[in-house]
Amino acid sequence: VPDILICDDDPTARFLLKRVLVRELNANVTEAPDGLQALRLLTTTRFDALVLDLRMPVMDGPETLEVVRNTPELRDLPVIVLSGETDADVIKRVVHAGVTDFLLKPLSRTGTQQRLMQIIERLRGREPATPPAAKARATGVNLTQGQTILVADPAEDFRYFCRVTLGRRFTVVEATTGVEAFDAALRLNPAAVLVGRGLTLLGSDALAKKLRATAKQPMGVLAVAAKTELPALTASGLYDGCLARTFVATAFEQQLEALGFAASPLARLIEKVPGLRTTVISATEQVFGMMVKMDVELVGDMMPPFTGGTVLVGKIPLSVNDEFEVDIDLICTEESANVFAVAMFGVPEPAEVLAELANIVAGRVKHAIVNHKLSATLGLPNVENVDPAVPARPAELSTRFGVIGTSNQLDVSLRVRERARTAVVTETPTEVPAGAPAEAAPAATATAAPAAGEANTASPAAAAS
Amino acid sequence: VEIVDHITTSTFSSEDLLAMVGSDDGMLCELRDIFEEEAPRVLQDIRDAVNTRDAAALEHHTHLMKNVVASVGGRASREIALALERAARAHDLGNTADLTDRLASEIAALRAALAIFITARIGE
């Protein structure tokens, strides 16, 4: 039975919320008419969630939320904001402070009930369970950057997902049938083959058997299947490892890590900032719900790029701890951006709306990072047209949202690079011919300094300290 | 203020009220009781704020009144409360006394309409 604290100066709103929470969700409800009384209750009683109005006397919603988020014992309390607010600055303030979810005013019995049930369900499973880590055989699958991976799967969307998630570190070759995959494996000797279910011509398990029987050099043969199929596939002994099929990049990567894949920069950032994906999703939902007044829902991760018409991207760079460079992009068609702009500003200003939305989402991501005791610096937003002739650099975490009841969609993507620590020579070096190996460089006192950009490919020999 | 001069919406919307309470007659009566208790109190707070020319207090009380009347289907009174809230936010208090009188009249009409609706619905 959840214990919920409702904080609102409007007794009619408290009444309606209490009625729904008690009758439909069997909750224990306590009421407070302002933020100060809510904080008094929060310091003496344990609650599972706080429903918080924004405009109140004595201590308003944003102030109360900031106190909650800055109090170690209360920092993780789920806070559902009640908002009929149209003031963008107030919305930015609460989104920045960290809202778990929101309810739009005016309340109605049916709408409030449905929304509250969604929220409570979401709170119950707040951190989606990660698929069980796959177990590699004793022989192991030891993959290193640059090797070839063959993805054999009949589904275009899953092959695309693999191309994007694995393509940053490996050469990805795709096959749609078992025969095609077997042929490619014999020709290319990939380091690993991901075998999806439902392959035709040569079935998935038959392909695995043939690969194991004929591979001339070590080749990891990995099954990719629904979670429910994994025990049987593991027991079959045909595969070196079994992965739960998912379109969540981080969950997929976690499974791959268990099989010996080198950790991606995103995985390393998520180690430091757990729940980063959840933050991106909730920030986007809140920003749309409260500022654009449109409800969005998850469509999927790593979806194929938008095509047709002009596509816009709102970009914000974020530097984390002098270790990571994160690009946060909001991408949609110009047509959709116009719809969002009219809803938000009343005028079709697609670039402005993308910049504004990107800025707020990025602000929330930054806040989540800072909460994990890392430093973070946001750059300025920029909006560009996507040139279809230039392939986009693949994102590491890309989530597509659809506006409920419309065909408008939006991608929120994060690309993470690690800053390399390159040597800064502090004594006058002897001149070294261009192209000489790093080992040939003269001894010199060197200190580590961060360098931005695609420096994660820099030679380890160049690193110091 | 301009909006209020052109109010064409109804005093009471049973649709709005039923969206709030559904078919739950017990909830309808409880909500009516809360409205009967709150509306006069908040109206007095609004009058006090107008008399003392306290724009911040006026903004707060009219915001609250807007939600209270909306919860029982008061459309016209909601619009007047909204106009008062906007005037207070803009520190434009010149016409707020007249608006408050209009709000009081609309609330009286809303109470009467609500009573008729509840009597017709459940005979109370």
Image (cartoon, coloured by chain):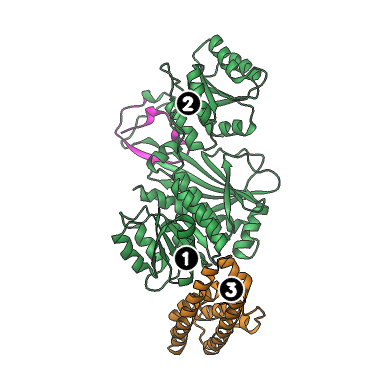
Q: Secondary structure at mark 2?
A: loop
The chain assigned the colour orange in the figure is B
User: Where is mark 1, residue-wise?
Assistant: A90
Q: Residue at x 48, y 71 (%)?
A: A12
> Amino acid under label 1?
Val
Residue B13 location (% of width, % of height): 63, 74
Q: CA distance from mark 2 to mark 3?
A: 74 Å
- Chain of the residue under label 2: A
On the image, the x and y values in percent for residue A371 come to: 36, 50
- In the picture provided, is A324 more to the left or to the right than A351? left
Question: For this rendering, which residue is in front, A333 or A380?
Answer: A333
Which chain is in green here?
A
Let me know if marks 1 and 2 both belong to one chain: yes
Write down the residue under mark 2: A145
What subunit carries mark 1? Answer: A
Q: Amino acid at mark 2?
A: Gln
Above or below — where is A94 with respect to A185?
below
Asked if badges 1 and 3 are on one and the same chain, I answer no
Residue B102, placed above or below residue B13:
below
Residue B49 against residue A301 in the figure, above or below: below
The residues bearing labels 1 and 3 have C-alpha atoms spaced at a distance of: 42 Å
Specify whether disc 2 shares its chain with disc 3.
no
Q: Which residues are magenta?
A: A440-465
Rendered position, A420 above or below A233: below
Q: Specify the subunit that label 3 lies on.
A: B
As measured in the structure, the alpha-carbon distance from the residue carrying label 1 to the one carrying label 2 is 46 Å
* Secondary element at image label 3: helix
| Mark sitting on residue B122 | 3
Farthest-out residue, front: B123
